[in-house]
Amino acid sequence: MAGIDETQDVIDFITELAEAIEGAREDGELDIFDAVRFLKVAPSVASLVKDADEIKAELADLTAEEKDELIVGLKESVLKLIGALT
């Protein structure tokens, strides 16, 4: 079994992105501090690209429990992102 660590990292990235957006929107102005928020998320993107093959392998070998865990995590993360964008 491949596990789901790398796939979970995708969900974590979506959450991090949502939090960066929420933080940037707090004061209603785009400034250098907001750029820093998004730069902190950038290393996650590089890691996700590097681990793409591992994610593919994980998704091909999911147990029912792992599927459920990923679905719940992805739902929460995407809802957070939608909330940050609206």
Image (spheres, grey):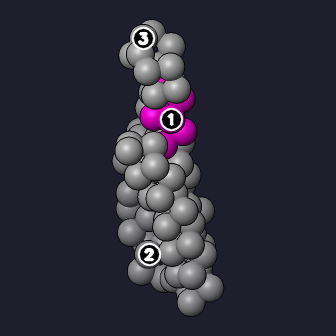
Q: Nearer the viewer, residue 39 or 79?
A: 79
Please state the horizontal and vertical placement of residue 18, each as a whole percent of the image: 48, 43
Looking at the image, is mark 3 or mark 1 earlier in the sequence? Answer: 1
Residue at left offset 47%, top offset 25%: 24
Please state the horizontal and vertical placement of residue 40, each as a whole percent of the image: 52, 27
Identity, as a three-letter code, of the amino acid under mark 1: Glu
Residue located beneath label 3 in the image: 31
Residue located beneath label 2 in the image: 59
Q: Is residue 19 above or below residue 77?
A: above
Residue at left offset 52%, top offset 26%: 26
Q: Which mark is residue 1?
A: none
Magenta stretch: dominant SS?
helix
Secondary structure beneath dot 2 equals helix
- Membership of 62 in magenta stretch: no
Q: Is residue 73 visible?
A: yes
Q: Which mark is residue 22?
A: 1
Q: Are marks 2 and 3 in contact (CB under 8 Å)?
A: no
Residue at left offset 50%, top offset 19%: 27
Crowd rating for badge 2 (residues with CA inside 10 Å; few <14, some 14–19, many 20+): some
Please state the horizontal and vertical placement of residue 67, each as a whole percent of the image: 53, 81
